[in-house]
Image (cartoon, helix red, strand yellow):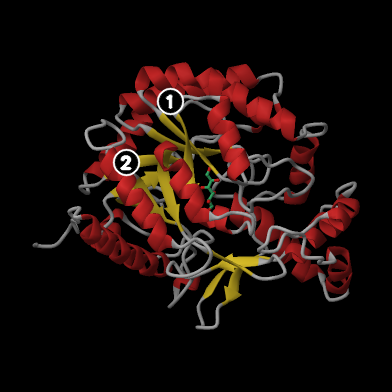
Amino acid sequence: MERTWRWFGKNDPITLAMLKQIGVEGIVTALHDVPLGQVWTREKIHDLKTFIESYGMRWSVVESLPVTETIKYAGPDRDEQIDIYKQSLRNLAAEGIHTICYNFMPVLDWARTDLLHDNPNGSSNLYFSIPQFAYFDIYILKRQGAKDNWARFQVLGPDGKPNGRNIIEEVEQLRSTMTPEKDHALVENIVIKTQGFVSGNFKEDDEHPVELFRQLLALYKGIDRDQLRANMKYFLEAIMPVCEECDMYMCVHPDDPPFQVLGLPRIVTCDDDIQWFLNAVPNKHNGLTFCAGSLSAGAQNNVVEMARKYASRTWFVHLRSCHVFPNGDFTEASHLGGRADIIQLARVFEEEEERRKGNANIERLPMRVDHGMTMLGDETKGYNAGYSFLGRMFAMGQVQGIIATVDRELNKPFHQPGFFD
Ligand code: DNO
């Protein structure tokens, strides 16, 4: 796999010169300054691509070319937005970029309740607490029907059966300990700090993020799982001719967390879902971002089995692993532990890459380590949540070691750029 890194553009405090020193071969980025729903021009793409190439790396993957809400809920201007999307795809391909990561999660991209949760070793990680999230929904967002939803919400145990957790009881206990400051911190974690840099729906300086959130949620009134699936199919069918014409590989990111939240349907959460969207539009340009972290947060998912099953339609890999507690809350595990089994995943995808030899544009399978620990001073640097430097570098070192070992077993050459070897 090609070792890539999510970089947030020229304002990212982590520079390309730094990345070069740690064995990064390719960059995963987006035009973060283009407002949501506007065409990415060739000029802007070219400018960033040339900048990346001046460091001896390539722009391997776009993460993300955002699918605007109107496409997801089928608003009146969705065709217009799809046309804009197609134009951006054409412009990207014309500049030699052929892999696009996107997601089809309504309103909320990924979700966490705590961004600096203590690990036993003194570092910290991202954390998702079901009762804290339910508290946000019921008492901060005050979503109609939220309490009923959470009363019926079933947390699945490792056997795939409901574990009997009483969420409402825990929410009420939590409520008695909450303060306005703690409420504010929860809003920051769920909306501002996690969405701001990925989705374009929210900005760091939004004055009324919760109100904005409510307005976006209202757009999905009446949209159930089947309807959202139909909208995803419509979008994919509409863009496939362009993807074929310019050999563009689309890879949807699984939903994070991989279960329903805020009464919104989520449709890329498990084996059945993946099978569904791949079959619904059976074209190799309709593929998957295999995000081991998101999938491993679902106790129902056997991540290695899924990797084997879907490797041939995977165009981008995210390596991280979750630890799911018996009560269903989860946190990021070490890249050498947790539910995902990154060692086995590296085998699956290194073998898959061998099968792709000679196929232009997909010959290398781009992989990035996903969220890493916040450690050794990362917390003071203002990095985006989950995207620390030292923590991700540590994970990258571990993953490179795994890949080198697997490659030795497979008799596959392993090259570590930047050294005399
Ligand atoms: C969070 C990421 C997501 C992901 C997008 C892809 O860290 O996993 O923001 O990049 O959903 O569209």
Q: Nearer the viewer, residue 99 or 162?
A: 162
Give the left or right position of residue 324, taking residue 13 as reference.
right
What element does badge 1 sit on? helix
Mark closer to the chain start, 1 or 2:
2
Residue, x 55% and y 78% (percent of image)?
119
Q: Is residue 402 above or below residue 219?
A: below
Residue, x 86% and y 59% (percent of image)?
139
Residue 277 location (% of width, % of height): 58, 32
Which residue corresponds to mark 1?
89
Give the left or right position of residue 226, taking residue 351 as reference.
right
Residue 375 location (% of width, % of height): 46, 75
Q: Is residue 291 visible?
A: no
- Residue 414 falls in image quadrant: bottom left
Question: Does the residue at mark 1 contact the one at mark 2 (Cβ under 8 Å)?
Answer: no
Quadrant for the C terminus in the image: bottom left
Residue 197 location (% of width, % of height): 54, 49
Mark 1 to mark 2: distance in Å? 14 Å
